[in-house]
Image (cartoon, rainbow, N blue to C red):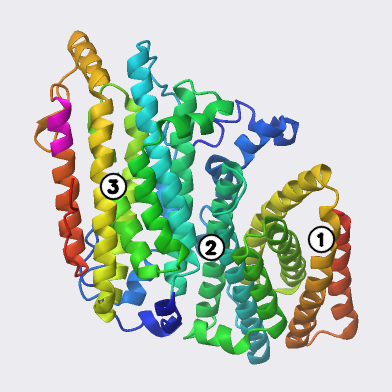
Amino acid sequence: MNPTSDLGSEPDDFDPHELEPGDFRDEVYSFEFWFQAVDGYLRDRPYGHSVPGREVTLEPSRREALITTLCNYCVGETAALEGASGMIEFAPNRHAKIFLATQVVDEARHLEVFLHRLADLGVEDPEAEIVARANPSLVRFKERLLEFVAGRDWDAAVFAQNVVLETMENTAFRAHETTADPVTAEVLDGVIKDERRHLGFGENDLGARLMREPGVRSRLTEIRAELDPLVLGTFEAAMGDLGADTARREALGREYLTAIERLGLA
Amino acid sequence: MALNKSLGPDYVKGIRVAEPGPGVKSGTGLNKGTLMSDFLNAYSIQRWLELCPQGYLEDTVYGHGADEQEPLIEDEVLREAEIRTTVQLVVGERAALAASSGLVNAAPDYPSKRFLATQTLDEARHVEIFTQRLYDLGVKKDDLESTIDQFANPHLVKFAEVLLEKVDNKDFVAGVVGQNIVLEGMAFTVFEMLEAGNRQLNPKFAHTLEGTIADERRHVGFGENRIGSLIRQYPEKKPEIERMQQEMSYHMLNTFSSAFEESEEARAVEKELAQEAGVESAEWQGVDLASADTSELEGALENTVINEFKTRLARIGLEYQAPQGV
């Protein structure tokens, strides 16, 4: 695709937020826009990284911790893949359906790159490892999200998936990126860029919904009260797997709570 | 679906590919005897990225060249016929989007989920590019849904409903046969015919169709290879799936019949204009697309689609069921 053709001759000056709402949706929630967004950071990065030779040999305990962490990333990404694909059917309009279709591929790609990373680390049966190492809080979160989706509950599903889950992942991935080996860090970098786009969709969709119907906020607050402990439980276990001290565990939880508070949705 | 629950992640291990699919070129390693797990890995997101957005869609806008425009259609009958045809494409692709996304959760293994994720975005892209063509033909954005409601063929809507009922029930095997063999097989052939007919008259639309044909070929290939092994394992599913195929085929043939009937006037105008413009004849399946009448076109399309169905269904161990009363 031609990255400049739809954006005029000076794509660097283009700011979709200056568009009218209808034009914004046409522009941003499209295959064309998605490809322009991802092409810059995915081209020449097969399976999310471009660094042959940057692979480092990890100490056994660090490798073991990384495998557990990646297995749980796979649980989260499977939740997001199944959640986003299930939401397409009851999405309220064509733009939302097309955006979610782009998200489906993003989430599937995340699952793929994490599975690939597990294979790099010598895990022979990643699917069995994922089942064995899955964090119970995260599994419960996934179940709850998919219940919202099965119930065709748009507000709850967007909030759980595109706000809470994406914020949780964004917080965890950013924290991990700072300490990860070079290959894992580069993989995480591409994933984080996608997650920002997904979070933006959730914020826009629910923000507009709250403008029209402020009463929805109390519902979102209830859902958040139910999901926050699952997120914090996931962090707690993840930090335990990594051998993090109490201060670091608390910091991660605080960072998530601050990020979600800042959105002002619930 | 109940069947899905019995298919664990170990399911694909050790199963071998029956035959390479039509979208699978020789030399890719996906030949007879390839391990199913290896075959599914070749349908990865990475491969899709390289093949599709970074491959044949590179330097395109809404599927065609950036400098290509929809030809101005002054004749109102012809313009309405183009809108009517494009509406059917949007309806079909919306069904395909709903089906492929709905099947992700029913897929029994990660590689199938990942392939269906790429198919979901392919179908969303098709919805987008055909919707864009409606705008290019002069449909106003505010009139999009009413235009689709006005022109959508009721038989095509019914065709989609039969498929989506299986998807709603999370019936992975029936859903993939309905989607990737029947719907995609039909779309693939219709797109090929439209592409051949538009190559000279409307290169922009022909190029748009080229990309969708390449996508559909991949989807059909996945359907044949993934489902063949499941049908062999669950032969008791055959009668139900064959009934679905028969019902979908019934609605498909009725869609063709009413579509060609509605297009007779436009076809006459089109032939006249082609003659005036000295357009060279384009042949498809032995039919001269510039001079054939609607009954010849309908016959060629029906025969081609049904022969495709027979071949593809046989590859997965099913027998084509001719619809009754068409």
Q: Position of residue A90 (x, y in %)?
A: 58, 53
Tags 3 and 1 touching, CB below 8 Å: no
Q: Is residue B187 above or below residue A175?
A: above
Residue displayed at 74% across by 46% down: A204
| Mark 1 secondary-structure assignment | helix
Disc 2: which residue: A109
Q: Nearer the viewer, mark 3 or mark 2?
A: 3
**Which stretch did the figure color magenta?**
B293-299
Neighbourhood count class around disc 2 (C-alpha, 10 Å): few under 14, some 14–19, many 20 upward = many
Would you call the spot at circle 3 few (<14 residues within 10 Å), some (14-19), or many (20 or more)?
A: many
Amino acid, disc 1: Arg
In the image, residue A16 above or below residue B111:
above
Both labels 3 and 2 in a single chain: no
Identify the residue under disc 3: B251
Taking the view exactly as shown, the residue that stands out farthest to the top is B276
The subunit carrying tag 2 is: A
The quadrant in which the C terminus of chain B is found is: top left
For the question of whether residue B45 can be seen, the reply is: no
Instruction: Identify the element where label 2 is drawn.
Output: helix
Residue at image coords 54%, 52%: A101
Q: Quadrant of residue B228?
A: bottom left
Disc 3 to disc 1, C-alpha distance: 44 Å
Amino acid type of the residue that numbered disc 2 sits on in the rendered structure = Arg
Residue ID for mark 1: A219
Q: Which mark is residue B229?
A: none
- Residue B184 image offset from top left, x and y in percent: 31, 51
Question: In the rendered structure, which disc, 1 or 2, sits on the residue that comes first in sequence?
Answer: 2
